[in-house]
Amino acid sequence: MSPREPATPDTGAGSGRNAGGGPGAGSGRGVGGAGGAARDPGLQPERTRLAWRRTTLTCAITAVLAVRGAVHGPGTATDVAGTAFIVLLWLAFLGLAHVRIRALAAARPAPLAPRAALGATVCVLALAGFAVAVIL
Amino acid sequence: MTDFGKDVRLWFAPQRVREEGETPDYRFSLANERTFLAWIRTALALVGGGFAVDQFLPDLRWGVRVGMALALLAVGAACALRAVNHWVRCERAMRRGEDLPLSRFPVVLSLGVGLVAVAMMVIVLMGWTNGR
């Protein structure tokens, strides 16, 4: 799979020179403005990608619990609607994580878009709202 | 409260975060993102806990069970909102070169979770269940 490859030192150095030389803004305050461009010892994009994976997994577990709570016996219309809602919710989160993980493959990933952060939050809030509806 | 309003507007206006200050080292942004995700996981776990209380403790009285579940769900929702809010504030502070924002939320969350745990223990030890 190619997403992992751009993080190797060679490619990183090429685009790193671009980013470091262009704006020169981050180099003043950043840890590795120009010198650290060739190598990222902390493997930050990798760790962030795994964090998204973990979060998607947590979301899946919560979604399973939600479906378990919503379905009682033979499938009534409400059960099916509830299950469909949760599955769509989980797919939305999965899509969000997927888009972000793709973006993290860049040598210098852009910061997370606020819209994505908001989307993840809305997913959690929707799950909580669904839980309230199921419990009451 | 006005500060909070300003933060909320920032959630919906991504370009306004970018307008301020300078772009920090991408590693700082990614660390901030991971912190955000850790909070989201915490929120998801709390919501999952709400589901679990409802589903796996059928012996509890209805009021206790529902109250406990709703408390966990409310804390989970608060956690999710706080996650995105704190993320935006940290991102902005980094762009402006300011100190990262302090927060009382972790203390409140710890106390809340501790309280629920103690309440749970008391309920079980005192046998305040339907006792089948």
Image: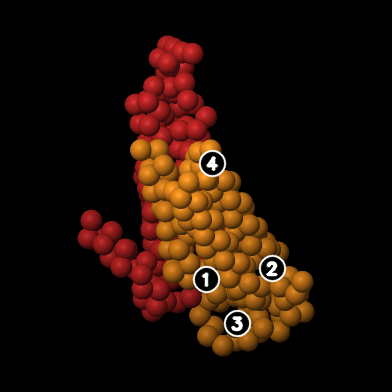
Chain colours: A orange, B red
Q: Are marks 3 and 1 in contact (CB under 8 Å)?
A: no
Neighbour tally class for label 4: few under 14, some 14-19, many 20 plus, Cα within 10 Å: few
Q: Quadrant of the C terminus of chain A?
A: top left
What is the quadrant of residue B95 in the picture?
Answer: bottom left
Residue type pointed to by label 4: Pro
Structural distance between the alpha carbons of marks 3 and 1: 16 Å
Q: Quadrant of the N terminus of chain A?
A: bottom right
What residue is disc 1 on? A111
Q: Give whichever of discs 4 and 2 has the lower sequence position.
A: 2
Structural distance between the alpha carbons of marks 4 and 2: 54 Å
Q: Give whichever of discs 2 and 1 has the lower sequence position.
A: 2
Q: Kindly report which numbered mark, 4 or 2, lies closer to the viewer in this rendering.
A: 4
Q: Report in which chain the residue with disc 4 lies.
A: A
Left or right of B68, for residue A110:
right
Give the camera-side residue of B56 and A115.
B56
Say whether residue A66 is visible. no
